Amino acid sequence: MIERYSRPQMKRVWSDENKFDKWLKVEIAVCEAWAELGVIPREAVPKIKLARVDLKRMEEILRETHHDITAFLGAVSESVGEESRFIHLGLTSSDVIDTALSLQLIEAAGLLSKDVKGLISVLAQQAIKYKYTPMIGRTHGVHAEPISFGFKLALWVEEMRRNWQRLGEATKAIAVGKISGAVGTYATLSPDVEEKACLKLGLAPAPISSQVLQRDRHAQFVTTLAIIASSLEKFATEIRALQRTETREAEEPFGAGQTGSSAMPHKRNPELCERVCGLARLVRGYALTSMENIALWHERDISHSSTERIILPDSCLVLDYSLGIFTSIMQGLQVYPKRMKQNIDLTKGLIFSQRVMLALINKGLSRQKAYELVQRNAMKAWKGNKSFLSLLKADKEVTKALPAKELEQNFDEQYYLRYMDNIFKRLGLTEAQWKGDMAKPSDLAPRAI
């Protein structure tokens, strides 16, 4: 991933230093397992644990061997001496690479999980803050009925809770090791070695493997990241729409001295949200590649290997960056309740059409007749300059069933917010629970999926 979209902690996870350190951890865990089983001398293990990877030396050997594991083993052996003959005993390259990769993915998932929890916390606090701030709800981009801005954000909270759970499930799927030899039959070692080594590494042994861990596990992980990125795109797209000049109900932060255009000094563009949207497309592309990696020839080929060197680090780096950016957007989000109110009033009361129709039905009119009466006045309001309420009051068929005072009672936007408390309590979104900066795992558990 390019430097611009890489944050330090996630960058470290996918560094060569960390990768080769994980490889060495796997090799040492296997040597410890062999020693416990009495196959190699116990006194060799302390010396093997002193092994180091000289990256410069590894590069030199790689230029000759064109094989990264043999280059790695050559560099490690030089740092150990005679006891190096026990390193990689009975193993194949994928035993080391795939098991170490699982360790990297778990480490990356830990950072992503923390990112997701941080975003949930910010969204929850903002949802509570704007729980009773009325705004127009839109369907097909057209004014529908009032909601609150907090209600919109509460919807995002629950979606991110589901994403947090998905990430946990995907992490569990990848938290396995494979120490089973060339084609997975343990012919050159034993299941006992795998179990002991995996236990030391904090992994579960894969119940069965070929020469590689099966790539449906990795596909589940990357597609989960793609779903999370798509949720961020959904949220960012909404902010972009709300930031349009004609709407301007909310906008992303815009700092002092920031510029939106080299040509037009007045511009305040949603460029951060647009960046989140663009990067989501990238992660979805990686998800497709991860699924194509599932189908390998026979017990394995290495068509997946070249792509995974790109898609696994980059999908983690991109999502980590996007979560950080979007969390900062939500922390500094500019919200304009007065503008929301102006937009509610834009259609001169048309948004109350359903309440009027239901009130007429309650007076004994058929649904078809009530709909007809309301719609004919609504269409006049769309085309003319008169308010919807004034047109209804002038319609004798309407006022015969529903007097003017009763008509007026249906034109109250607060009516649509009467169950906000119920909704927020159902989600566990109360001020008492969300005073801190970070949510506890128990706070994040989805109520339903």
Image (cartoon, rainbow, N blue to C red):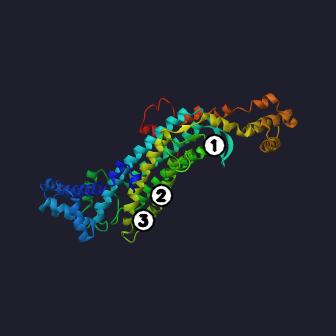
Which numbered disc flags the more N-terminal residue, 2 or 1?
1
Contact flag, marks 3 and 2 (Cβ < 8 Å): no
Q: Which residue is mark 3?
A: 293
Q: Residues within 10 Å of mark 1 (few under 14, many from 20)?
A: few
Measured as percent of width and height from the top left, residue 46 is found at: 14, 53
Quadrant for residue 72, please give it.
bottom left
What residue is rendered at 40% in x and 43% in y?
Answer: 114
Looking at the rendered image, the disc whose residue lies closer to the viewer, 1 or 3, is 1
**Is 296 displayed left or right of 37 in the figure?**
right
Crowding at label 2, few (<14), some or many (≥20) Cα neighbours within 10 Å?
some
Q: Residue furthest top?
A: 405
User: Residue at the location (55% across, 40% down)?
Assistant: 153
SS for dot 1: loop
Left or right: 356 in relation to 132: right
Q: Which mark is residue 247?
A: 1
- Give the residue number, with chain letter if any, for mark 2: 282
